[in-house]
Amino acid sequence: MVGHDIIVIGASAGGVEALTKLVRDLPASLPAAIFIVLHLPVTAMSAMPQILNRAGKLKAIELKDKQLIKHGYIYVAPPNYHLLLRRGYIRLSQGPKENNHRPAIDPLFRTAARAYADRVVGVILSGTLDDGSAGLLAVKSRGGLAVVQNPKDALFSGMPANAIKHVENVDYVLPLSEIAAVLVELAGEEVLGREDEPVSAEMEMECDAAEFDMSIMDSDDNPGVLSNLGCPSCGGTLWEQTNGNLLRFRCRIGHAWSEDSLHAQQGEALEEALWTALRALEESASLSRRMAKRARERNQERMALNYENQAGETQERAKVIRDVLLKNKGNGPIADEGVG
């Protein structure tokens, strides 16, 4: 008998605490393999396998590319690598970031759905924005099940709330304390086993893009509609895709964005541009003042006045940008309201 024995879990902010509590309640005899993506900075050192080993009875292990999949183990994505599933083994990839993350949740869920169909259970825990929503849609499209932490129970409600918003018929919305028991029950529940059913061309393309397949990048057959937006990561044109009511974007080389993640990244890019402009204007004003001083030392009064006027005008422009930045900083961080 085959059950729901492929459990894929995505978490972000608040995820360490959530994962620790979840793993603590899982039995050593669980007839399933667990795969975890926790958003991490590219340069971070992850201690999650050690944390999970101390917390629970299942063994969490450091991953290697092409590692065989076995029941009773927890596989945690390492920093700067997507964790992808093939039938029977794991791939680690430094393919294009999704939602500005590597590892990202969507590639894990999507490749699990492609390889294991209705054997997959996708779990979304605490986090901000909406990485994981597209992956959970892929899991459901192949007959898998969706489990989402109740947003009211999560430290950060954005990811769970967005999963519920974008994925029709989420199978379970539960407080964290009840998720482990459901996973145990589902692991022992017999499934049809639909792995050999055909996969959509779009899912194949997106799975291959995460593995840095050059044929995808060389292809002119991009899914979706050409938009007038540029990719924040590389500047390339984005193609717009719609999955249910979830709007997504992907560029030629594979960077992928949900609408909320794209909006957030554009905001960061705008702030960086404003700081760069402020620095350039301040430097220009400083140079104009120095040139005015040198001109006055040479008794070139008219030239000195011109430089001083230029410095004043430049300083005024800098003040406008500085006021915008200060206003932003004064507002403080935006509270997580479950829609990010």
Image (cartoon, rainbow, N blue to C red):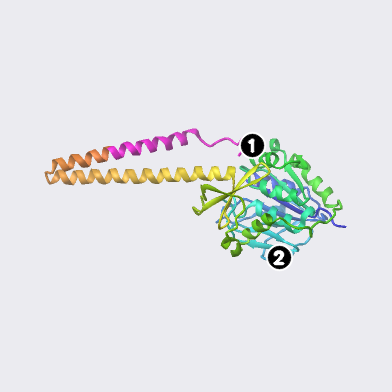
Magenta stretch, overall SS: helix
State the extent of the magenta-drawn residues as a range.
313-340
Q: Which mark is residue 338?
A: 1
Q: Position of residue 186 (x, y in %)?
A: 83, 49
N-terminal of the two: label 1 or label 2? Answer: 2
Q: Amino acid at mark 2?
A: Gln
Q: Is residue 49 in view?
A: no
Q: Can residue 219 be found in the magenta stretch?
A: no
Q: Position of residue 6 (x, y in %)?
A: 77, 55
Q: Residues within 10 Å of mark 2 (few under 14, many from 20)?
A: some
Quadrant of the image containing the N terminus: bottom right
Q: Position of residue 233 (x, y in %)?
A: 51, 52
Q: Can residue 330 be found in the magenta stretch?
A: yes
Q: Which mark is residue 94?
A: none
Q: Residues within 10 Å of mark 1 (few under 14, many from 20)?
A: many
Q: Residue furthest right?
A: 1
Query: How far separated are the C-alphas under marks 1 and 2?
Result: 36 Å
Q: Is residue 91 left or right of residue 315?
A: right
User: Which residue shows up at 85% across the image and 57% down it?
Assistant: 2
Q: Is residue 273 left or right of residue 88?
A: left
